[in-house]
Image (cartoon, rainbow, N blue to C red):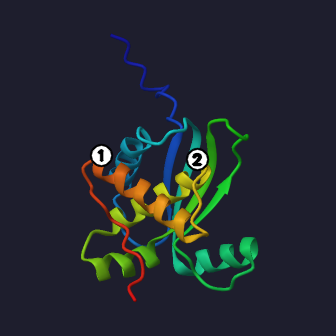
């Protein structure tokens, strides 16, 4: 048996990092996301998910989208058309905590939804029209159900 502790194995194509003070179970989030990615109809080359706070998300949202408000997820897709996913996704822990409290589930479950949402954007889904919105969230539900989490997104109520 080769005990090569000086040269650990290369990390996989998925990295989940925290850049906020909020306590997040990053190993659970990474494992759940890896499981969910098995059900996405596009291979993953490289995916980085960064968990940030409201202040950081607000700055990023304003800089990249011109909107001076926080948001749940921003996706930076560097994938070649039709190629494997190569993206950076930023998810907001503060927004996820607020939403998770409303829906009475765990912060990590909400963050998983946000990360998956970003990946689905890279895989060709969009949510700008009512039909696209419904299709994208149905795909999220399908994938999260397949990995044992279950439907998580709940849209605005009228």
Tell whether label 1 touches label 2 (CB within 8 Å). no
Under circle 2, the secondary element is loop
x then y, percent, for residue 119: 54, 52
x then y, percent, for residue 29: 37, 54
Which is more N-terminal, label 1 or label 2?
2
- The quadrant in which the N terminus is found is top left
- The quadrant in which the C terminus is found is bottom left
Q: Residues within 10 Å of mark 2 (few under 14, many from 20)?
A: many
Image: 124 above or below 129: above
Question: Residue placed farthest to the top in the image?
Answer: 1
- Residue 75 is drawn in which quadrant? bottom right
x then y, percent, for residue 104: 24, 76
Front-lying residue, 54 or 151: 151
In the image, taking residue 20 as reference, residue 148 lies left or right, namely left
Under circle 1, the secondary element is helix
Image: 80 above or below 55: above
Front-lying residue, 105 or 12: 105
Q: Residue at x 27, y 55 (%)?
A: 149
Q: Residue at x 62, y 85 (%)?
A: 69
What residue would you read off at disc 2? 123
In the image, taking residue 13 as reference, residue 157 lies left or right, namely left
What residue would you read off at disc 1? 146
Count of numbered circles in the view:
2
x then y, percent, for residue 57: 59, 75
- Residue 121 is drawn in which quadrant? bottom right
């Amino acid at each position: 048996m080769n005990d090569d502790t000086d040269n650990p194995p290369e990390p996989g194509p998925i990295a989940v990092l925290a850049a906020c003070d909020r306590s997040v179970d990053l190993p659970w989030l990474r494992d759940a996301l890896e499981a969910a990615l098995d059900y996405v109809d596009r291979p993953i080359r490289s995916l980085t998910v960064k968990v940030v706070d409201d202040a950081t998300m607000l700055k990023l949202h304003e800089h990249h989208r011109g909107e001076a408000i926080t948001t749940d997820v921003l996706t930076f897709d560097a994938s070649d058309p039709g190629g494997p996913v190569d993206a950076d996704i930023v998810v907001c822990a503060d927004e996820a905590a607020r939403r998770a409290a409303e829906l009475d589930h765990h912060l990590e479950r909400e963050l998983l939804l946000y990360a998956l949402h970003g990946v689905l954007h890279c895989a060709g889904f969009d949510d700008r029209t009512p039909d696209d919105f419904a299709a994208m969230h149905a795909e999220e539900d399908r994938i999260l159900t397949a990995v044992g989490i279950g439907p998580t997104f709940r849209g605005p109520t009228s």
